[in-house]
Every structure is written in structure tokens, then in C-alpha cells.
Image: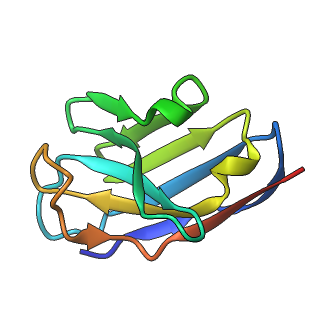
Amino acid sequence: VQLVESGGGLVQAGGSLSLSCDASRSIFSINAMGWYRQAPGKPRELTATITSGGRTVYADSVKGRFTISRDNAKNTVYLQMNSLKLEDTAVYYCRVSQTEVIASAPYWGQGTQVTVSS
């Protein structure tokens, strides 16, 4: 499956960015979609996920600031990031799964850099 991410960039602390991940070229049905992130020197971590039914999960560090959403017709997932902090700086990866369980899914995007400056 090909996942095409877009929307990363440089933003000042307190600002906003929106990411999108297009999975429309998938040849199979997608259930869970999500975003992970990896900061320098740290392991990749779950940021937010959403199932095809709209159930969401957020990392505690982003609750209340980030919103994940999806367009099932377009097989696209979005991440709206508000009130960005320096510690949100990371490469953000899209991940999708054929089931509601995303943790073991092998389908990743190429990553998009988000840099938050002071």
C-alpha cells in the first residue's frame, strides 16, 4: 500500500500545522489509520489513531491539542496540531491497518518532518 504524507514544516511554538496521509491507492480495505512520531534519539511512539468507525486514541502528551480525523471515501487521514510545543518536534509517520489493531500493521508512510521553534 502506498501512503503519501504531506503538511509538515516549520512553525513557531503555539502555532498550528495540519498533516494529511493519502492511502487512496490501497488495494485492500483499510480500517485503522494513525499517526506516530519519532523525535531524535527517541523511539517511535503512537500519537493518535482512528478506526473506520471513528473511535480515536490519543497519546496523553497531545490530548486536547491534536485532533485526528479521516475521510473514509478518500481513504485519507488528517492530524490537526494546535498549540504546538518544542517537544512536538519529530518526524511524523502515517500508519494504516486492515483491522482495528494498528500496533502490528506493517504499512508506514515515508514520514514528514515537523519542527517547532521557540
Q: Residue furthest front?
A: 41
On the question of residue 32 being in view, the answer is yes
Left of 30 or right of it: where is 33? right
**Residue visible at 57% across and 68% down?**
112
Q: Which of 53 and 13 is in front in this view?
A: 13
Q: Image quarter for residue 110?
A: bottom left
The colour scheme of the drawn protein is: rainbow
The percent position of residue 55, horizontal first and vertical second, equals 26, 27
Left of 12 or right of it: where is 46? left
Q: Which of 68 and 116 is in front in this view?
A: 116
On the question of residue 74 being in view, the answer is no
How many marks the image carries: the answer is 0
**Residue visible at 23% across and 74% down?**
1
Left of 39 or right of it: where is 105? left
The percent position of residue 60, horizontal first and vertical second, equals 47, 30
Q: Can you say whether 1 is above or below 55 in the image? A: below
The percent position of residue 48, horizontal first and vertical second, equals 40, 41
Q: Can you say whether 106 is above or below 66 in the image? A: below
The percent position of residue 74, horizontal first and vertical second, equals 34, 52
**Residue visible at 22% across and 46% down?**
32
**Residue visible at 61% across and 61% down?**
90
Q: Residue furthest top?
A: 64
Q: Image quarter for residue 80?
A: top right
